[in-house]
Image: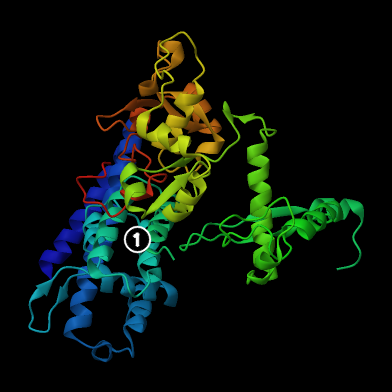
């Protein structure tokens, strides 16, 4: 115990030295010190896991004077019941283990344990990963769980906990593809429709409140397009503009709610095909979908839309029967030239479509803004001589695009063709430089295949 006491005393002495140094260091040096100290603090739980693993394996809480291990911690450490429970759960998953024969075993979440021991993951990062593991369906196999743990541990080393949670949610989706009468002003304030987060099975919940005017329009459309036999996706040739025949009516087994859904899907198709919606960010308003030729050929997997949602391959193939030429854009690059040199600052429509396919959304790490709401960004600034070539263009949301011009951040293309975002030198403490959120197909690939 003397050795332990001396080591702890040494730690306290080193902290005192660092405390004195704070008064003399320059501001960039203070940021560097803060980063180093944070890494050390983050690694401390690894020692705690080792301690708890020995205690819970070799003895019983009653031998230490309490009825449970949670009570041992709340008494000895003066922490809350909730905190004690969290520490014990983390130790069980991140601490060393032993087989029945006494043979040492790695932690359950081996990659996360190693990252925490190295000081790259905070308690909040670990909580995100823990929730991810807890929410995984029981049928997910051990190898997939381990691969997911490696993926999240690697991502967490360069993302904030909030950004890691978004990546974890996307990874989970890839794994499990399954009052009184109001006044007019009150009604106007309450109006709104929300499309919920896409669930693991690809479905999304639509909720909201609509005005009397909206309902009046809805009722007229519903009377026509949601009638039995209309807009039925099960029919070889769905009826959308004439009257359905008797056979179409009799064979329609959809519920009223399903007919309503299919009616509004038909309305959306009509609006997109009308050509009356104009353009958005330099492209005609249309559905843009990114996938690979290999996935199309095997009719499996999911594609990614310009809105950031996942689209099962069967749905994509059904949609593409009316717009096959859009698929050719991604496969054959079309005949429209993609290299414009410095003759224009604005990207051509063909370049924008290609960027929807390659970048899919804002490329700054942690940003989840999908392609439909992004702007073209010159990797090498146009003002500094950057050309409007496809190799020098990427996607960025408005705030991040403007941030480049107002701060010391820069962008570049790495050897994999991915856009890297480089922070100012004083803040470059290991944050991830490439955004993988919009590329769910990279999840669970071998580590040497999916890049940083």
Residue of label 1: 126
Which residue is at the front of the view, 112 or 316?
Answer: 316
Does residue 328 appear to the left or right of 116 in the view shown? right
In this view, which residue lies farthest toward the front?
246
Does residue 102 appear to the left or right of 220 in the view shown? left
Q: What residue is drawn where x is 24% and y is 69%?
A: 142
Does residue 12 appear to the left or right of 288 in the view shown? left
Does residue 183 appear to the left or right of 198 in the view shown? right
Looking at the image, how many numbered discs can be counted on the residues? 1
Disc 1 crowd rating (10 Å Cα; few below 14, some 14-19, many 20+) is many
Q: Is residue 360 visible?
A: yes
Q: Position of residue 291 (x, y in %)?
A: 39, 43
- For the rendered model, the colour scheme is rainbow
Which residue is at the front of the view, 238 or 403?
Answer: 238
In this view, which residue lies farthest toward the top?
343
Q: Position of residue 166 (x, y in %)?
A: 44, 53
Q: Is residue 420 visible?
A: no
């Amino acid at each position: 115990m003397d050795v332990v006491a001396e080591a702890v005393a040494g730690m306290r002495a080193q902290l005192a030295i660092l405390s004195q140094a704070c008064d003399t260091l320059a501001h960039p040096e203070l940021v560097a010190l803060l980063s180093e100290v944070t890494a050390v603090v983050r690694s401390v739980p690894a020692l705690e896991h080792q301690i708890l693993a020995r205690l819970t394996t070799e003895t019983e809480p009653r031998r230490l004077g309490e009825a449970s291990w949670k009570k041992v911690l709340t008494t000895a450490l003066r922490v809350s019941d909730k905190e004690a429970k969290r520490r014990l759960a983390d130790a069980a998953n991140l601490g060393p283990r032993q087989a029945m024969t006494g043979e040492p075993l790695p932690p359950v979440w081996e990659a996360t344990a190693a990252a925490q021991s190295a000081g790259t993951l905070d308690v909040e990062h670990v909580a995100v990963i823990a929730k991810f593991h807890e929410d995984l369906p029981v049928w997910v196999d051990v190898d997939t769980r381990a691969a997911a743990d490696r993926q999240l541990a690697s991502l967490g080393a360069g993302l904030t906990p909030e950004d890691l949670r978004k990546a974890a949610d996307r990874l989970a989706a890839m794994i499990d593809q399954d009052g009184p009468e109001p006044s007019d002003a009150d009604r106007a304030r309450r109006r709104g429709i929300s499309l919920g987060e896409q669930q693991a099975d690809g479905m999304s919940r639509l909720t909201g409140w609509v005005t009397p005017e909206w309902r009046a329009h809805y009722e007229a459309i519903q009377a026509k397009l949601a009638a039995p036999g209309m807009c039925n996706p099960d029919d070889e040739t769905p009826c959308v503009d004439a009257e359905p025949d008797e056979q179409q009516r009799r064979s329609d087994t959809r519920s009223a709610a399903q007919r309503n859904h299919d009616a509004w899907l038909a309305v959306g198709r009509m609006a997109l095909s009308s050509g009356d919606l104009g353009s958005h960010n330099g492209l005609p308003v249309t559905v843009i979908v990114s996938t690979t030729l290999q996935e199309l050929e095997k009719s499996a997997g999911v594609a990614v839309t310009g809105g950031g949602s996942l689209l099962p391959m069967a749905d994509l193939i059904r949609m593409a029967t009316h717009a096959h030429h859009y698929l050719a854009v991604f496969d054959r690059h079309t005949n429209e030239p993609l290299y414009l040199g410095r003759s224009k600052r604005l990207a051509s429509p063909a370049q924008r479509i290609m960027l929807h396919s390659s970048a899919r959304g804002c490329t700054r790490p942690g940003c989840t803004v999908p392609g439909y709401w992004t702007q073209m960004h010159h990797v090498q600034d146009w003002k500094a001589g950057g050309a409007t070539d496809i190799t020098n263009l990427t996607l960025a949301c408005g705030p991040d695009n403007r941030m480049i011009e107002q701060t010391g951040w820069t962008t570049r293309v790495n050897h994999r063709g991915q856009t890297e975002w480089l922070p100012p030198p004083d803040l470059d403490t290991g944050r991830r430089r490439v955004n993988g959120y919009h590329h769910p197909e990279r999840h669970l690939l071998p580590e040497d295949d999916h890049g940083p």
